Amino acid sequence: MLKLKNKFSVERDISGCGLCGIINAKKVKTTGEDIKKAISVEHDRGNGLGGGFAVYGNYQDYAELYAFHIMYDNLSAKGNVEEYLKNNFIIEKEEPIPTSKTSKIKDHPYLHRYFMKPKSDRQDKLFHDLGDDDFVVQSVMSINEKYDGAYVFSSGKNMGAFKGVGYPEDIADFYKLDEVEGYMWTAHNRFPTNTPGWWGGAHPFTLLDWSIVHNGEISSYGINKRYLEMYKYNLSLKTDTEVITYIFDLLVRKHGLPIELATTVLAAPFYQNIDKMDNKKKELLTTLRQIYGSALLNGPFAIVFGYSGGMVAMNDRIKLRPLVAATMGDFTYVASEEAAIRAICPSPDLVWSPKAGEPVIVKFEELVAQKGGLIGL
Amino acid sequence: MIKSSFSNIQSEYLALIDHTKCVRCKRCIQNCGWGTYSFGGDKILSDHTKCVACGRCYTYCPEGAISIVKNPTVIRENGNWKENHIKSIWKQSETGGIVISGMGTTFKYKKYFDHILLDACQVTNPSIDPLREPMELKTYLGKKPSKIELDFNEEGEPILKTKMPPQIELQTPFVFGAMSYGSISLNAQKAMALAARALGIVMNTGEGGLHDDLVPFGKNIIVQVASGRFGVHRDYLNSGIAVEIKIGQGAKPGIGGHLPGEKIGLDISRTRMIPIGTDAISPAPHHDIYSIEDLRQLIFAIKEATNYEKPVSVKVAAVHNIAAIVSGIVRAGADIVYIDGYTGGTGAAPNIIKDHVGIPIELALAQVDERLREEGIRNEASLIAAGSIRSSADAVKAIALGADAVAIGTAALIVMGCHVCGKCNTGNCSWGITTQRPELVRRLDPEVYGERLYNLISAWSHEIQEVLGAMGVNSIESLRGSRERLRGVELTDAELKVLGIKHAGL
Ligand code: SF4
Ligand code: SF4
């Protein structure tokens, strides 16, 4: 049976995983071949129940439009959702997402993509003055929540998520990613422990141009979720990854925090370290902890987080999951295992293991990766 | 009316002396605040009717010669007409008065904390060892803005623009509950002040004003303003770290207080700013607060008087409509809301109120936290939960249900020797806690009990760290409101729904 949404009677999905990321700071593109090769080295970190990729820069021709990737259980769900889309969006182009038949991927849902922008006279304008981004977020949440058999798994501009049930290397073949080009890639191999595979549950998890691949379990999930609900986020997927995405969305897009500061919320420095900082920094970080204590991600995690401006890879505050980074020219690589990086970049300029809570941040306008979050403040 | 010569009310306890062990040192005579013992020429006599089982005598008997036993003489058992009903009827028929007692209710209502279980990590996420890794308990009480405001300098570095409202910094999420000078002795207050300072937490003056001896502890004191306005003046408001408006108390919601004139000696009279020997009566309502907008005025009058430098807390009893009430209090501008459950303690309260009015703190807290979140104002105020927090486990569960911190009242008195005999209202407390008799107060050494309070809160804090570690988190804010880490046992669907938790096994 196909499953797009988490209908199991669990509060949330738990999984172990492998992850990879590649970014070229000068926006030189690579095909999906490299990332597939890297993630396939981490084959044993998954169990065939979920694999996926996010790529940035792949929809150059439609860069100004929101690219929705939607999976459907059946054609009637497709009809219902398309009616909603037509009422609220100008759809410039729509088509099935290109796939190839492979014996490894069975039972896939209908996979369709739409390039579109919200109508200026959409119905909700009567009541709200939502910006386009906010309206897209609202639409994604309402489709995922209310339309049975439909699930939006990508909604950003000039980027896309490609994911499903299977090992990531098979998913890459299924979506023909060797023909797709982008300047930033992330990949994920999933090992769920309490739910069977479901297409929607594979990573990356995306919202607008945020994409997250994540290895770990957020032990603070309960309060993170309730905190986000206070800001009207609807956590329908019941996954940790969804929580992380929304926290980034809240902090960066809605509250205007620079990425560097947002990472100090997710993996807050300990008070014993804050107390040693100079007064200004101490005040800033204490205030951040006071205000955003409920957004602290506690428990083991390694995440690779992509957005239109670049990539962030980081660990939890005591590094309970693996994460390795390397640079080679304008390329930065991150992965759960160094072997994954060496598979595609045998002798990098620099290889290191980021410290607990200290993010690796690569921005497109900058040419060097920053090592360590607090240095960047 | 003719005074009848007999009483139906039999002594509840028997103070038995083993005369073969007794060495007639007469310590028991000295120690008992209720006058149970006397010397009969050759042996100690005990007047059982006076014994309240406060435990002082046998604790201090050097020979272990005393045992206090429940009077075995039975009142015929009856599931409907219970002993307390029958005794109250006798008492009231003899006195014509309201039955009053101290401490919290003695009724055995369902204790929800005892039906909540905690989570721990296994395999998929690792637990954390608090002996090896930092485990943060630091807690800030006060209003938090919903978002940070930043400026950026030329280098693009963020500069903090947010002006944080005043906060109380607690090294561990405990505070001592409000107990006034008058209801308890100055030495009992001093013990709490010493412990609060050493622990980096706070105590609360209650409504009895601030004694001069406690002024140096200002950074660790919340000063209270209650309906009697005893001892309230501008310097008083500014002498603590925060100001609390007391609207109600868990043990006696809707009821005022009455400290009889005989307890108002020179010191209390000065501290409360009332004449010696007059009754100190706290009216049931604040006579300037008849509605929520009046509360707002008082909150802001206090903020004006303290230059907006002190958080203002509002203490309320948990009553039926508590969620809406607290929402109103938060909107009225309170920085902290202190919610006191119906099992909370008191110096004196009518039994009918103590035993029958209010609701459990667990349910109140769960609903308040949920309501404030639904309304998007949970950040506007911190929540303190109280009403018989008996252990660190209760504290952990309260925090996971949504409290920022918990308040300790009765537990702190138990540290000082209190045996929860419930006779605080008599002013004879043998332990020197709820009494003003100098010979009794003197025996409570603030240094000794300050240290024991320190020990208790430290021990409980370590236990919380163990629980956090087992849950795989290393900061108390990751537990706060994280109900996903709680499960209920032996609870109905309705109870689970109110608590916002799932049944164990789900
Ligand atoms: S304290 Fe004990 S030994 Fe001393 S007189 Fe009383 S019963 Fe006897
Ligand atoms: S404080 Fe004293 S009088 Fe009150 S219950 Fe405790 S021991 Fe009894």
Image (cartoon, helix red, strand yellow):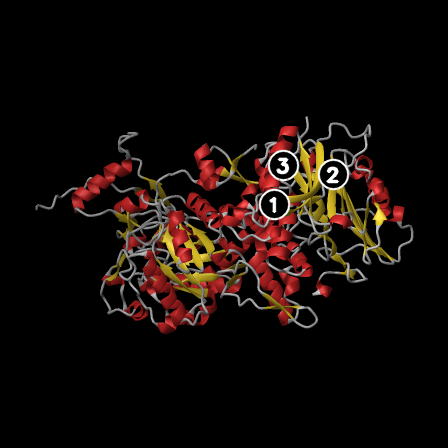
Q: Position of residue A123 (x, y in %)?
A: 53, 45
Q: Looking at the picture, tell me which residue is in the foreground, B277 or A28.
A: A28
Q: Are marks 2 and 1 in contact (CB under 8 Å)?
A: no
Q: Amino acid at mark 3?
A: Glu
Q: Residues within 10 Å of mark 2 (few under 14, many from 20)?
A: many
Q: Position of residue B433 (x, y in %)?
A: 37, 58
Chain for numbered disc 3: A
Would you name the residue on which mark 2 appears?
Answer: A163
Query: Which SS class for mark 3?
Result: helix
Q: Is residue B267 above or below residue B415?
A: below
Would you name the residue on which mark 3 appears?
Answer: A82
Same chain for the residues at labels 2 and 1, yes or no? yes
Q: Amino acid at mark 1?
A: Tyr
Would you name the residue on which mark 1 appears?
Answer: A221
Q: Which is more N-terminal, label 3 or label 2?
A: 3
Across the whole image, how many numbered discs are drawn on residues? 3
Residue A60 visible in this rendered orientation of the protein: yes
Q: Which is more N-terminal, label 3 or label 1?
A: 3
